[in-house]
Every structure is written in structure tokens, then in C-alpha cells.
Image (cartoon, rainbow, N blue to C red):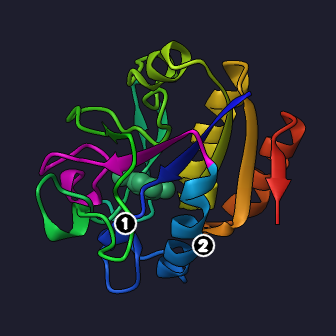
Amino acid sequence: MTQALIVVDVQNDFCPGGALAVPGGDEVVAPINAMMDRFDAVILTQDWHPAGHTSFASSHPGKDSFDTAEMPYGTQVLWPDHCVQGSDGAAFHKGLRTDGDLIIRKGFRPGIDSYSGFFENDHSTPTGLEGYLRSRGITALTLAGLATDFCVAFTALDAARLGFSVTVELAACRAIDLDGSLQAALEGMESKNINLQS
Ligand code: VGL
Ligand code: ZN
């Protein structure tokens, strides 16, 4: 079985001091670096939004961060401006090993968000990651990174739906946990036979 590690969004804006800081976000760096050598392939995802992105509360007059908005593709949580292309906040944490095989950027279309590394939030626009993995013969994925309840969970659920064998290494993940979103994400992943490792 060819196994890949997918490192999700370990970027400055999701670490303490960042625009959308995940509690303890920087604590995933050391365990992820240590995991990398055990895999046949290492892929990093990078949240990569244009200024004025539709997922930013600042793009919706009268709305605050963490409110929701109805989009053509469903309900969207509105976030503080984060991971703007080329900004320091969008850069990987400086301690993270970035000597992986592929960096996949997502969320670059102005009018749609992309939590998953596989599909945008309409669940149908692909990023190309599936084709990359399949053409390399990769069948098993281990996920780690930020945030457990958004980009890690969405990536894991899409991977399971596509037929990959999926493990989430919870000790190398941290959550935003908005209104019970962590519990919901864990239950959702468990119900799809995703192996939650802790
Ligand atoms: C993420 C919210 C907005 C994540 C990305 O990486 O989990 N969450 N953009
Ligand atoms: Zn984002």
C-alpha cells in the first residue's frame, strides 16, 4: 500500500498570533515534522485566498466574523481576513518542514471557499489532488494539521468518499471548535470509517 501524509494548512494565520489563530495551532509542527519520513509521499495544503474573498466577513457589510451567510453553494461561516495570497499569514509556520512532494493551494477562487484539499465547498469543483494521488498509486492517506473541525475534517471526508483509506492523527491536529463543531466533525468522520488516531 502506498501511503501519503497530507499536512493541512499549517500556516501562520492559524497559529497563535495569526488572524484566525487555532488554540495550540503551533503545537502540531513538531509531531508533523517527525511523521514525514514514514511516508512514501508528503503533500501540504495551503489556504490561499485573494484579498476580498467571499469567505471573509469584511466582504459582507453588516456581518461579523463567525456569522454565517447563505451562498449559492450552501451556508458559509464568515471568517476574519486570513491567508491572503503572498502575505506572511499565508506562509507556512517557519518551523514546518516544507520539503514535501507537492503543495496544493486552495480557496483561490474569489467567490467560493475551499476547506477540503480535494473539492471546493460546492463539493464538486476539484483541486486536482485526487488525480495526483491516483496517478502516483497512493491508496492510503494520513492527515494532520489545522483545523481538525474544518479543513482536516472536510479533506478526510472527501478522501473517504473517494475510496481512500483514511487516518486522522489527532495528536497532530488542533481545532477551532465553533459551537460544537469539533464534536460534530469527529462524529461525522467516525461514521464514515475514518480511523481517528490519538
Ligand atoms: C480553515 C477556516 C477558514 C482551516 C481555512 O484551515 O481549517 N478554516 N479557512
Ligand atoms: Zn480560509
Circle 1 packing at 10 Å, graded few (<14), some (14-19), many (20+), is: some
Q: Kindly tell me whether residue 144 is visible in this rendering.
A: no
Residue 163 percent coordinates (x, y): 73, 19
Three-letter residue code for mark 1 = Ser
Q: Depth check: 165 or 119 in front?
A: 165
Q: Which residue is mark 2?
A: 31
Q: Residue at x 54, y 81 (%)?
A: 27
Q: Quadrant of residue 193?
A: top right
Residue 123 percent coordinates (x, y): 52, 23
Q: Which residue is mark 1?
A: 65
Residue 78 percent coordinates (x, y): 38, 55
Q: Residue at x 60, y 72 (%)?
A: 31
Q: Quadrant of residue 148?
A: bottom right
Locate the N terminus by quadrant: top right
Q: Is residue 51 magenta?
A: yes
* SS for callout 2: helix
- Residue 17 lies, with reference to residue 163, above or below; the image says below
Residue 117 percent coordinates (x, y): 47, 36
Q: Is residue 48 left or right of residue 137?
A: left
Locate the C terminus by quadrant: bottom right
Range drawn in magenta:
39-61
Q: Depth check: 198 or 146 in front?
A: 198
Q: Residue at x 63, y 56 (%)?
A: 149
Q: Is residue 114 left or right of residue 189?
A: left
Three-letter residue code for mark 2 = Pro
Q: Is residue 190 left or right of residue 3?
A: right
Q: Depth check: 87 or 183 in front?
A: 87
* SS for callout 1: loop
Q: Is residue 156 magenta?
A: no
